[in-house]
Image (cartoon, rainbow, N blue to C red):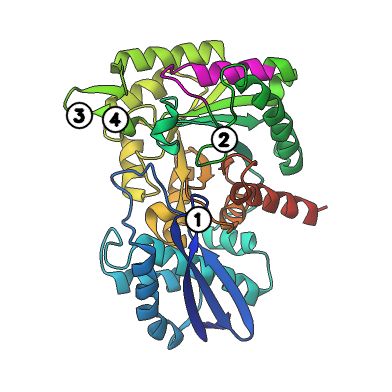
Amino acid sequence: MSKVKIDQVKSQIISDSRGQDTIEVAFISNKRHVIASVPSGKSTGTYEAKSVSAEQAVKNITTLADKITKQEFANIKEFDNFLLEADGTKDKSNFGANTTLALSIAFARLLSREQGVPLYQTLGEAAGVAKPGFPQFFCNLINGGLHVDKALNPLPVQEYLVIPQTDSPQKSLELVLQFVGVLGQMVKKYQNDLVQGDEGGFVVSGDDFDLGVQILEETLQSTQMGEQIKFGLDIASSSLWNKEEQKYIWRNKVWTVDELFFKYQVFKQNYPLISIEDPFDEDAYVDWHKVVDSLEGVWVVGDDLTVTNIERIKEAQEKQAANAVIIKPNQIGTVSETLAAVNLAKSYGWKIIVSHRSGETEDDFIADLAYGVAADGLKAGSPLQHQRLVKYQRLIEIEESLK
């Protein structure tokens, strides 16, 4: 295959879903024009690749542009290797993971255009995936933790997720939207106003760890959807962990490891819970293993634990600390490294959930990624927020194209 020549590289600062600065990149080649933008996370793992300010990222792209336009690249791996060598650090602290990822996504998108195939096909082939597949939707419908302004007194659990039990994107979105309509009425039983958090889900005030799940269950019973809907939780425990006291703390509430573990057992017994993300701190491998060992049938999902990093994923597997993983491209900084993380986790038999971030853009790259690598889930927030909805709509678009 002939190599891709990039004639122009442009970048600019845009606003993400929280109104904060992020970057957008444009590649122009052979009269083709593609753009890519990257999100940012508020609840970030200690071991994530480093990002820089949007202003600095634009400067870095300007620095790299001259070198990019003087070369030709055969594939995603070759382009990403160029970025890694240019950065020269293990954690992207030189140019920033947001800088390298914006360029990497733009190249992948341009390559798919040059090949005349959908982006998901280019990504699937780069990953060596035999057949693409639609993921289940993981929709964060009640936002808590760091995804909500502290003044709103949010619940301690960061994400209360609804997971339609179908691999049809169209049917999934229909079920979620139906559920959201009833959920809003249920939330109003507990408070007067409907307020949205960072990821478009409703905010429920209080310290009660269980309340969000109870509201989801009440909604499920009201909708009579039965087995069509399951639940997931993102505890984001690293944001609750107090190293000095060796306890999990949220405002005036305190939980020991054993108390949290007991809660997870009760949740599994009383609710249709199939997924629990970051149940304990990112370094608490023994506690993670206990969850994996005891909550049979539940996806124990690494996010802060694994940060889309093959070394962290390897360690989690060695210590039997997870059986599923969140894949966030901006945690690692290039498309090829993201695909490597997917392949490693798949080799362990883990479930794969491709995920957005709390500060999102309208770029729907992760939808093509999820379908292209046949991920088990796509976590993109509540469809009530446009930057989240476009990811789900892209999967519906792919579904329609295959009919």
Which of the two marks, 4 or 3, is nearer to us in this view? 3
Which of the two marks, 1 or 4, is nearer to us in this view? 1
- In this figure, which residue is indicated by the disc labeled 1? 16
Instruction: State the CA–CA distance, disc 4 to disc 3.
Output: 15 Å
Spot occupied by residue 143 in the image (x, y as percentages of width and height):
50, 32
- In this figure, which residue is indicated by the disc labeled 3? 243
Instruction: State the CA–CA distance, disc 1 to disc 4.
Output: 34 Å
Q: Is residue 82 visible?
A: no
Instruction: State the CA–CA distance, disc 2 to disc 4.
Output: 30 Å
Which of the two marks, 2 or 4, is nearer to us in this view? 2
Please state which of residues 178 and 168 is positioned toward the viewer in this rendering.
178
**Sequence order check, earlier mark of 2 and 4:** 2
Quick check: is 212 in the magenta stretch? yes
Spot occupied by residue 380 in the image (x, y as percentages of width and height):
57, 44
Category of crowding for the residue at label 4, using alpha-carbon neighbours closer than 10 angstroms: few (below 14), some (14–19), many (at least 20): some
Q: Judging from the image, what secondary structure is the residue with disc 3 in?
A: loop
Amino acid marked by disc 1: Asp
Quick check: is 85 in the magenta stretch? no
Question: Dividing the picture into quarters, in which one does residue 158 lie?
Answer: top left
Instruction: State the CA–CA distance, disc 1 to disc 2.
Output: 16 Å
Left or right: 352 as drawn, with respect to 32: left
- In this figure, which residue is indicated by the disc labeled 4? 285
- In this figure, which residue is indicated by the disc labeled 2? 201
The quarter in which the N terminus is drawn is bottom right
